[in-house]
Image: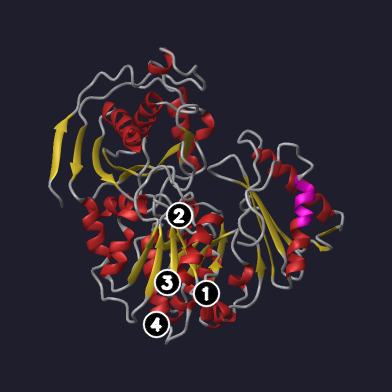
Amino acid sequence: MSEAKSFGAETNGEALLRRPVDRLPPNSAEYETVPLVKPTGFREYDARWLLGSEINLLGMQRLGAGLGVLLARRGISDVVTGHDFRSYSMPVKHALVLGLLATGRNVHDIGLALSPMAYFAQFELGVPGVAMVTASHNENGWTGVKMGMDPPVTFGPEDMLELKEIVLTEKLSAAQGGSYRFVDDFPAQYAATLTDRPSFTRKLKAVVACGNGTAGAFVPAILERLGCEIFPLDCELDHSFPNYNPNPEDLRMLRALSSEVVRTGADIGFGFDGDGDRCGVVTEKGEPIYADKIGLMLARHLSRHHEAAGFVVDVKSTGLFATDPILKQAGARTDYWKTGHSHIKRRVRELGALAGFEKSGHFFFAPPIGLGYDDGVVTAIAVLDMLAEAEGATLSELYGALPKSWSSPTMSPHCPDEAKYEVVEQLARAIETRQAAGEELAGAPIAEIVRVNGIRVSNPDGTWGLVRASSNKPELVVVVESPVSEERMMDMFRSLDVLLRRSPQVGAYNQTFGP
């Protein structure tokens, strides 16, 4: 364990524990004396707010106090915290820490970090709680916290609902005790653990794009230590994100990554999100591969090394997991589950699966590959291992060996937080009514409806579409795929879009087809 600095913390905490309001006039005395916490910031599995208009620093203190009370009720006294690289993340973290201290929690601060570093610290330091200050891939202006108390899983909807009730409604009381310690140079411990293994069996060249976000401080050096030749792209930390948002699903990031891979002649390109728990992949030809297809390639690779392996994928993912002949031959099992890093992590543990894959780029590897949480660096290492062991094959050749399908990017039409769940329910009722009446959708009968997360509707030929409410932004999530043709994929998109347009709350899409 690293050297740590400690001091006691005792406070009556009355100002920190005041009940919050959901709106405040800016540039006012009230803004500096009353906690602001907008209720919609409590998402399904983490918390996200626009700093200033939806939460202030006193509101973040109140959140820390509420989290401290929840941890105390579960018998947990210690919590790891860290922050991502944004201009305001450190003061936001300090406000959160004040709230935790006011309720008597012991805080272990690892400083500037990736989210997977904070999850790793739960294991390395023996600390059950975690509160990582990050807005992940959200645009500048957003802040948030990813929380957990049962490693490797993080908060799910029930935990978030309980936390919301505590923060917004309960009269909180300060507790005696509590302590703070800063853990020196913790990222070095994380890097040492990931590189305590043989180098890649084949010399590979990789472009690493970080969007000037937190991953740039850590990822290139880790991959270099494992024998990969690195071409860094936008790895200099700059919290203004001058080039594009650090989001491996962002088309501007993918275009920049693709161009650099072609320019350098690299074997592969990786794109990391703002807090390093997601990883996007581009082939040596500059072709982006959606994360669900990378998951399918990894499942094929891992099923050769692990007999009857189990995999969990989210409902946005390709239907090929259920029909792939190589997975069937290997006796692999695939479970489609709710979208969201918290949901997939829990499901991987519940089923004893080897890995979980989410189309947004969150990958979860259980032992012996990982520790069960989502880690973009572990994902990149797993992909490089797969490519190194591919007997000279290129990544595009591995991709080309998959069964053919036509799939869309993850599209996100705007929809207010207050309306998005009802919009999805209205859509689902309309489709269920069609199915009951024997009517068609996308020019074909409705073969199956899955309601595990939003609505996923399928035709008999395997064409399917998904609509769900985003868990962390005022948006819907729309994905379509067909194993038959691009036209059948577009049939499904057009049919769902017509139904969605019946709701005036649904706005423009964030992106269209094709990078």
Judge whether 305 appears above or below 486 on screen.
below
Q: Which of these two is toward me, 118 or 460?
A: 118
Query: Which badge, 3 or 2, comes first in the chain's sequence?
Result: 3
- Residue 140: horizontal and vertical position, in percent? 46, 40
Compute the Cα span from label 1 to label 2. Answer: 36 Å
Give the amino acid type for the residue marked by disc 3 in the picture.
Answer: Thr
Find numbered disc 2 in the image and state the secondary structure of the residue it sits on: helix
Give the amino acid type for the residue marked by disc 1 in the picture.
Answer: Lys
- Do labels 4 and 3 touch, CB within 8 Å? no
Task: Specify the segment rendered in magenta.
Answer: 494-500
What residue sits right under mark 2 in the picture?
Answer: 346
What residue sits right under mark 3 in the picture?
Answer: 264
Rendered image quadrant of residue 489: bottom right
- Do labels 4 and 1 touch, CB within 8 Å? no
Rendered image quadrant of residue 277: bottom left
Q: Is residue 164 left or right of residue 512?
A: left
Q: Residues within 10 Å of mark 1 (few under 14, many from 20)?
A: some
Q: Residue at x 28, y 26 (%)?
A: 102
Find numbered disc 1 in the image and state the secondary structure of the residue it sits on: loop
Residue 285: which disc?
Answer: 1
Query: Which badge, 4 or 3, comes first in the chain's sequence?
Result: 3
What residue sits right under mark 4 in the picture?
Answer: 389
- Mark 2 or 4: in front is 4
- Residue 335: horizontal and vertical position, in percent? 55, 64
- Mark 1 or 2: in front is 1
Q: Is residue 323 left or right of residue 93?
A: right
